[in-house]
Image (tube, rainbow, N blue to C red):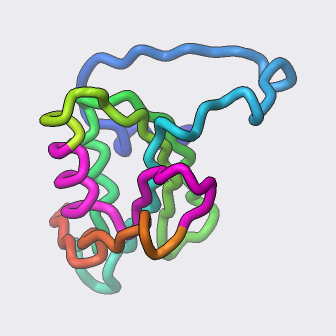
Amino acid sequence: MEGSPTYFPNGQYVITYSNSSDLDSDDLDYSKMAMVISLEAKLAKSDTLIGGLRPLLSALTDFEYCCTIDRTNPAYVTAGIWIVEPSNPAELEKLKQVLHENSVFYAFNDGTGFVTLNNARMGNGVKKLVKI
């Protein structure tokens, strides 16, 4: 993420910061979050990207989320995203549609505490082609 501002669409962002030593991962309430995986890879000899990472980040501007973007491999970029599930049913349906269209994989918490075939879905993000 550092040194790569192109991964965030233009717009206003609210950023909060706290020392990671003060945070305990057990304090986070994952029961109200969706887990998402997305990617982006540049085709050889082409100005085309495969993966829905950029469209996904653009579509998530109306939602509260945090992400880690891994750019350590020069061939592709991967992202792990946690999205706070909206309480409004219409917004939740919109989120499901956005994730289905742009992510590679996503899961909503079903109360089991595990990612299973019941709560996980494959998105169409790998089918996304983005001209750069």
Q: How many marks are shown on the rendered structure?
A: 0
The residue shown at (31%, 31%) is: 86
Residue lying farthest to the right in this orientation = 21
Looking at the image, is 9 positioned above or below residue 75? above
The residue shown at (24%, 80%) is: 46
Q: Report whether residue 2 is seen.
A: yes
Looking at the image, is 8 positioned above or below residue 45? above
Looking at the image, is 17 positioned above or below residue 96? above
- Residue 121 position, x and y percent, is 36, 70
- Residue 116 position, x and y percent, is 52, 71
31 relative position to 64: left or right: right
107 relative position to 2: left or right: left
Near-viewer residue (84 or 46)? 84
The residue shown at (56%, 58%) is: 71
- In the image, which residues are magenta? 93-115
The residue shown at (24%, 72%) is: 124
Residue lying farthest to the bottom in this orientation = 44
Residue 94 is a magenta residue: yes
- Residue 7 position, x and y percent, is 37, 44
113 relative position to 91: left or right: right
Near-viewer residue (68 or 35)? 35
Near-viewer residue (60 or 85)? 85
Residue 16 is a magenta residue: no
The image quadrant of residue 122 is: bottom left
